[in-house]
Image (tube, rainbow, N blue to C red):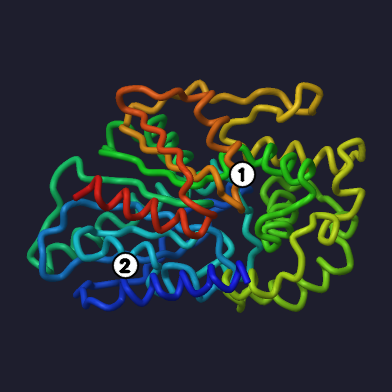
Amino acid sequence: MKTLRMLCLFLLAGWHVCSYAAKVYERAVEYSSIDQYGDTILLSGKISVPENTQAKGLILLLHYTIGANAEVPSQHTLYEARVFHEDYVLVMPDYIGYGSTIDRFPPYLHGDLTAHNCVDMLLGTHALLTQMLDSLGTSLPSDSILIVGFSQGGATALWTLKHIEEHYAEQIKVKRCFAGGGPYDVASTYDDALATGQVGMPLVVPLLVMGTNEAYGLQLNTDNFFTPAMKHFYNRHMADKERGVVSLVMLSPQHRLDYWLTEFAMDKSQAETRLMYEGLLRSSFVHYPLHERACGDVICPEWRPQTPLYIFHSYKDDVVPFVNATHLQRCIPSSSSITYDFGSYGGHLRSLFVFLKNVKEQLD
């Protein structure tokens, strides 16, 4: 019943946003970047430009976790895009594993790599975007780049801002960054699932284990990690990348962790499980062990954002545990330019709508 209410809310919100017409020019694009091995690959995404108005700026819009290839920006109009596309130029990457790289398994939550890919899209499509703006007789104001992302996109937003400030500070000027509901501490998210025995969104389980294996070339025997139920669910519903995230949530019969993961996968004394956990640490933007005796060192980046930053998270997030936000705040404290917005904003999906509303109000 709870999942059904979430679905109805999602559909209702989508209808509301689509109920007013906005003239935008959208174009799917491809650009050159690198994969986790450093090899050159061709990635895809979409650029959206408002046709009948002077754009207020450019948003690098980073999408949340998806299930179907049809959900990526190059294939359809993102819900988040409908919130901003009347007023902003949007640059929206697909990420590795979708779009032009559908034949590959996504290196899920490999933040440093995904950030590199996102920045390459900004740089690689600049000339094309200029042509599109010229053809519409419009332009962008200077210092107009914003970064917006929620969930997987929220973590990617921080990784991307860090990558820009460390490597392209003179070339790319980011005005503000907005990150919501992000898995900044992937290792502690796994530990939280072990402690509670529950997983908020079961489709993330194979993405996280197989994606970490793919991201860092760990050569894990993933058969040791998944129960027969998980193998059946993945092979039947996820492997072909044809079912969307809402459909996969509806199809998930159980949120109990041991329904999906084996005892081996939940035992960090096992060599392969420990190796997988070390991969989760590498994917963590920050990390604090949940318990004093837990494995894993504290991870805090030496980098401190120079760009105004807005971090949003709901206390009641049922997919990305709130501990992700508190660990981030311990590493990067509040300041005159860093704002943390924590509140009882409902579960993960409901809080997405609140986040986007808050971002739009701040930009307006």
Checking the image for residue 321, the label placed there is 1
| Quarter holding residue 199 | bottom right
Q: Residue at x 37, y 62 (%)?
A: 80
Viewer-side residue, 326 vs 346: 346
Which residue is drawn at the image coordinates 71% and 23% (left, top)? 297
The residue nearer to you, when weighing 359 against 305, is 359
> What residue did someone put label 2 on?
82
Give the crowd class for mark 1: few <14, some 14-19, many >=20 residues within 10 Å: many
Of the residues shown, which amino acid type is indicated by label 2? Arg
Quadrant in the picture for residue 171: top left
Residue at 61% x, 37% y: name it. 185
Q: CA distance from mark 2 to mark 1?
A: 27 Å
Q: Is residue 312 left or right of residue 67?
A: left
Q: Nearer the viewer, residue 93 or 185?
A: 185
Badge 2 marks a residue whose secondary structure is helix
Could you tell me which residue is drawn at 49 percent across and 71 percent down? 71
The part of the image, by quadrant, that contains residue 204 is bottom right
